[in-house]
Amino acid sequence: MKRIFSFLALFVLVAGFAFANGGSNDLAYYKYSELKETASVGLTDEFIVVESNIPKKGATIGDIIALVGTGGDDITGDGTGIISGMLSSVEIATTGDTLTVAEAGKTIIVEPLLEEYTTLTYVLPTPAAGIEFTFIAASNDTINVDPASTDTTIYYLTLDGGDKIVSPAATADSVTLIGYDSTSWGVKAMHGTWTDGS
């Protein structure tokens, strides 16, 4: 009987504490994978962290979302931090492609399936400040990198708006392009003498 009374007393205490805190659930246990499923938990729900890779304890779901951000959020450091242990996105490309902004940062290694040498064309998305793409030739194939429209310029040699940049068709040719506004791409790095493809 005493056990039942103790349990009821604890229940009333917990319920009263939750009510006093706006009905938040401060005794819920959520796994890390569940933190992204905001449809299943409320933003004011509190939780007790049970996995060591979460740096906050007793926070709300809203706190964690604010901490880790959502798609498209900026992450700003103070210039002294180091990011390590991260992999770059790499694609082994056997055909040409029209790229999207969502693929920004990707390194494309061009390696056609055909035995004979060929030309592959990659159409860039509309540029924006800071997005970049790298192209590397894994064989003696020609790589065309084409801007999205005649309103977009790759600033290299005498290229006009809409002109593509063309590799010299040698193994290990490479170019990294970086956007610096909504109409312009710049050459960040290059190997081999690329030309104006008009």
Image: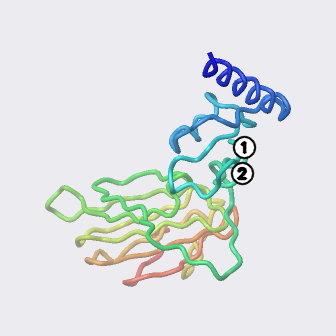
Front residue of 3/9: it is 3
Horizontal side, residue 132 vs residue 28: left or right: left
Front residue of 38/26: it is 26
Question: Are there few (<14), some (14-19), or many (20+) residues within 10 Å of tag 1?
Answer: some
Number of numbered discs present?
Answer: 2
Q: Label 1, secondary structure: give it.
A: helix
Q: CA distance from mark 2 to mark 1?
A: 6 Å
Give residue 127's position: percent from left, percent from top: 62, 61
Q: Label 2, secondary structure: give it.
A: helix
Circle 2 residue? 66
CB within 8 Å, label 2 to label 1: yes
> Which residue sits furthest front?
2
Residue 110: image quadrant is bottom left
Quick check: 86 above or below 114?
below
Quick check: 56 above or below 4?
below
Q: Residue at x 38, y 63 (%)?
A: 108
> Which residue sits furthest top?
1
Q: Residue at x 58, y 40 (%)?
A: 36
**For the residue marked with disc 1, what is the amino acid?**
Gly
Question: Are there few (<14), some (14-19), or many (20+) residues within 10 Å of tag 2?
Answer: few
Quick check: 119 above or below 1?
below
The quadrant the N terminus occupies is top right
Give residue 153's position: percent from left, percent from top: 61, 68
Circle 1 residue? 62
